[in-house]
Image: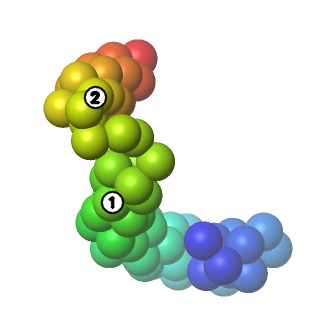
Amino acid sequence: CIWCLIFLANPLGGYSWQLTEFIIGVFLQILGLPFVAVAQVSLFSKITSERTQGFSQGVRRSVGGLATIL
């Protein structure tokens, strides 16, 4: 996130200002998650064959679920 690189790399101001910058950075990253998730699923379905697409998507979701837990 460019916001975090610019504002959190060299923090200025007091605690409340730094916390505000951090919260804005986290909000911007969470705002972008749906776009990344949709693009990932779409591109993954393009590179798998139609015959094994259901199995491949299941494996992808299982690995994603394990990664979330870890």
> Label 2 belongs to which residue?
52
Q: Is residue 1 above or below residue 48?
A: below
> Measuring 72% from the left and 72% from the top, which residue is drawn there?
5
**How far apart are the two marked residues, 1 and 2, measured between alpha carbons?**
15 Å
Q: Where's residue 59, x and y in %?
A: 30, 22
Q: Where's residue 12, x and y in %?
A: 73, 81
Q: Where's residue 34, x and y in %?
A: 28, 66
Q: Tag 2: Cα neighbours inside 10 Å, few (<14), some, or many (≥20)? A: few
> Label 1 belongs to which residue?
42
> Measuring 41% from the left and 17% from the top, which residue is drawn there?
70
Q: Secondary structure at mark 2?
A: loop
Choose mark 1 or mark 2, whichever is in front: 2
Q: Tag 1: Cα neighbours inside 10 Å, few (<14), some, or many (≥20)? A: few
Q: Earlier in the sequence, mark 1 or mark 2?
A: 1
> Would you say residue 30 is visible in this rendering?
no
> Measuring 60% from the left and 71% from the top, which residue is drawn there?
1
Q: Quadrant of residue 49?
A: top left
